Image (tube, rainbow, N blue to C red):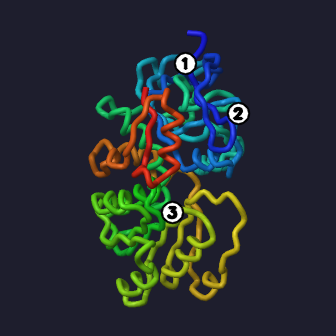
């Protein structure tokens, strides 16, 4: 094979399928037949021009595929293995890697580096970002490991336990998976905010105790009624924007915990006085790494393979790579009923 198809951004709200050169994996990298890839919120940020667009390489990182070629020095995998891919590679040698915080690796780079990502027929990925999957796991489930790992880490960053009431701001993929992870962790009570009917329906199916439609209900009033004015123990903010940060701070109890896992792409004006008077702890959640003794990816794989999280409930649309333009259009417009849109090969 000398060429392959790859979907590449060509401008604001523009993406096209192009014929590109197939590149064998460099040393330390693995060639993968990209069987199924999800369109992520970060992909949409690039699509809308909020973040930089690559006009030379296909994006796509919520990918499950089959190993087809090994670069020099790669061990532990072989052609035919089914794998899921982390968003980034890490060196394993720097201070952060040695301390177990490999998501802060000083040499961290996009896992496919100067190669095409999952929105192509084939992708190359660094061995440090690859996880072998059980044979029983479908390609669809495998492509959902990455976003579930993001959400699992956010719940872990909150140190949420069976004693905690947990609120999640946002009913998209990360919000829904944060809900599922919180339910799997056995927290006391869950609440999630939604904007669309499909989000409300899914949240109920995933076990939400309370679903707040922000177009029809006042979030602060709902939480005050639920908690007797105390506030939620944990709030996980998955949407971004100053209004959502302020909403999170308005419903967290004093000495509660707020975790920010949204894609903030511009400076914001927010009310920091709430942090001062409430002494709430505010922290971020950066992709995934280790939460406890296991990686967040390993935890996500176990949650899906064990059936503790029915991840495929999130997938509302599936398109072949040839229909990538329509797939992005649908994913970008939640009025379409979309939650998670997958490209399949």
Q: Earlier in the sequence, mark 2 or mark 3?
A: 2
Name which residue lies at 46% across and 82% down.
Answer: 220
Measure the alpha-carbon separation of dots 2 and 1.
27 Å
Relative to 38, is 122 above or below? above
Residue depth check, mark 2 versus mark 1: number of the one nearer the observer: 2
Quarter of the figure with residue 268:
bottom right
x then y, percent, for residue 47: 62, 44
Which dot marks residue 156? none
Q: Is residue 72 visible?
A: no
Q: Residues within 10 Å of mark 2 (few under 14, many from 20)?
A: few
Q: Where is mark 3, residue-wise?
A: 157
Name which residue lies at 28% across and 45% down.
Answer: 306
Which dot marks residue 70? 1
Left or right position of 229 against 61: left
- Quarter of the picture containing the N terminus is top right
Name which residue lies at 42% across and 90% down.
Answer: 229
Marks 2 and 3 close (CB-CB < 8 Å):
no
Relative to 119, is 97 above or below? below
Q: Residues within 10 Å of mark 1 (few under 14, many from 20)?
A: many
Left or right position of 250 against 114: left
Left or right position of 101 against 206: right
Marks 3 and 1 close (CB-CB < 8 Å):
no
Residue depth check, mark 2 versus mark 3: number of the one nearer the observer: 2
Query: In the depicted view, which residue is nearer to us: 178 or 104?
Result: 178
Measure the alpha-carbon separation of dots 2 and 3.
35 Å
Query: In the depicted view, which residue is nearer to us: 19 or 247?
Result: 19
x then y, percent, for residue 269: 70, 74
Q: Where is mark 2, residue-wise?
A: 55
Q: Earlier in the sequence, mark 2 or mark 1?
A: 2
Quarter of the figure with residue 193:
bottom left
Q: Residues within 10 Å of mark 3 (few under 14, many from 20)?
A: many
């Amino acid at each position: 094979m000398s060429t392959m198809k790859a979907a590449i951004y060509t401008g604001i709200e523009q993406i096209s399928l192009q014929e590109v050169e197939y590149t064998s994996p460099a040393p330390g990298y693995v060639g993968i037949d990209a069987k199924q890839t999800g369109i992520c919120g970060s992909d949409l940020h690039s699509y809308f021009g909020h973040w930089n667009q690559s006009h030379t390489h296909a994006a796509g990182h919520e990918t499950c595929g089959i190993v087809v070629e090994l670069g020099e020095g790669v061990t532990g995998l072989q052609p035919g293995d089914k794998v899921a891919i982390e968003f980034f590679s890490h060196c394993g040698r720097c201070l952060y890697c040695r301390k177990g915080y490999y998501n802060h690796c000083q040499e961290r780079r996009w896992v496919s580096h100067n190669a095409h990502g999952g929105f192509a027929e084939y992708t190359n990925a660094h061995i440090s970002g690859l996880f072998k999957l059980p044979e029983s796991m479908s390609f669809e489930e495998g492509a959902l490991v990455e976003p579930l790992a993001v959400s699992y880490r956010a719940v872990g960053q909150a140190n949420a336990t069976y004693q905690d009431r947990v609120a999640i701001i946002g009913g998209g993929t990360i919000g829904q998976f944060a809900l599922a992870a919180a339910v799997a962790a056995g927290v006391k009570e869950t609440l999630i905010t939604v904007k669309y009917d499909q989000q409300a329906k899914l949240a109920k199916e995933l076990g939400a105790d309370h679903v707040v439609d922000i177009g029809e209900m006042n979030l602060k009033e709902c939480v005050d009624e639920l908690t007797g004015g105390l506030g939620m123990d944990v709030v996980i903010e998955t949407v971004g924007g100053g209004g959502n940060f302020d909403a999170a701070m308005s419903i967290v109890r004093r000495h509660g915990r707020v975790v920010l896992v949204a894609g903030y792409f511009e400076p914001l004006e927010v009310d920091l006085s709430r942090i001062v008077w409430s002494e709430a702890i505010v922290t971020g959640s950066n992709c995934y790494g280790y939460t406890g003794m296991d990686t967040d990816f390993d935890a996500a794989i176990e949650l899906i393979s064990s059936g503790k999280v029915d991840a495929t409930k999130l997938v509302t649309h599936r398109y072949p790579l040839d229909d990538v333009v329509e797939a992005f259009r649908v994913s970008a417009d939640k009025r379409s009923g979309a939650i998670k849109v997958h490209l399949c090969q």
